Amino acid sequence: MYRPLLENDTAAVLPGPPGRPDVIHIEGTSVSLEWPPSEHGGGAGITGYVVKIMSGLDADQYDTKRVDEVTTSCTISGQLRQQTLYKFAVTAATDAGQGPWSEWSDEVQTNKGCYCLEFSFPQPV
């Protein structure tokens, strides 16, 4: 269970929740997120984050993406469908386990897939 780390506390406890994730870019079915880090690392040091991906109204039906770096951003691609509404939450992970989830992001909709063709024409003489 999460609890703030107390002074002189040596036991590893779970980290606190990260800040609410913001969607910073959507391109096709790829979504880029960033979030404020957890204020309390739990004494064990944050080893990464897990992003919860939810589509629809059922909070029990979701997918996840693990971010193994200690970074507070990621791009999710290959897991999302075209023209679908999604929202995201984040949790911090340590060797002691995962802390509580952040608040949900705003709901966003992915775009249609984009197929880009590149044409090259000879220059007129």
Image (spheres, grey):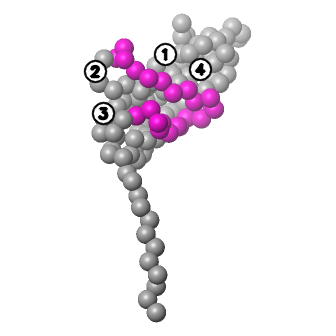
Q: Amino acid at mark 1?
A: Pro
Q: Nearer the viewer, mark 1 or mark 2?
A: 2
| First to last magenta residue range | 59-80
Mark 1 neighbour class, 10 Å CA radius: few under 14, some 14 to 19, many 20 or more = some
Contact between marks 3 and 1 (CB within 8 A): the answer is no
Residue topped by disc 1: 100
Residue 102, visible in the rendered structure: no
- The earlier-in-sequence mark between 1 and 2 is 2
Point 44% across, 32% down: residue: 79
Q: Nearer the viewer, residue 38 or 73?
A: 73
Q: Earlier in the sequence, mark 2 or mark 4?
A: 2
Q: Residue at x 46, y 81 (%)?
A: 122
Residue linked to disc 2: 57
The residue singled out by tag 4 in the image is 93
Callout 1 touching callout 2 (CB < 8 Å): no
Identify residue type, mark 4: Ala
In the image, 110: left or right of 13?
left
Asked which secondary structure carries label 1, the reply is loop
Q: What SS does tag 3 mark?
A: strand
Residue 90: x and y, percent?
48, 25
Find the distance from the CA under tag 4 to the CA under tag 1.
10 Å
Label 4 crowd bin: few (<14), some (14–19), many (20+), radius 10 Å: many
Disc with the residue nearer the chain's start (4 vs 1) = 4
Separation of residues labelled 4 and 3 (CA atoms): 26 Å
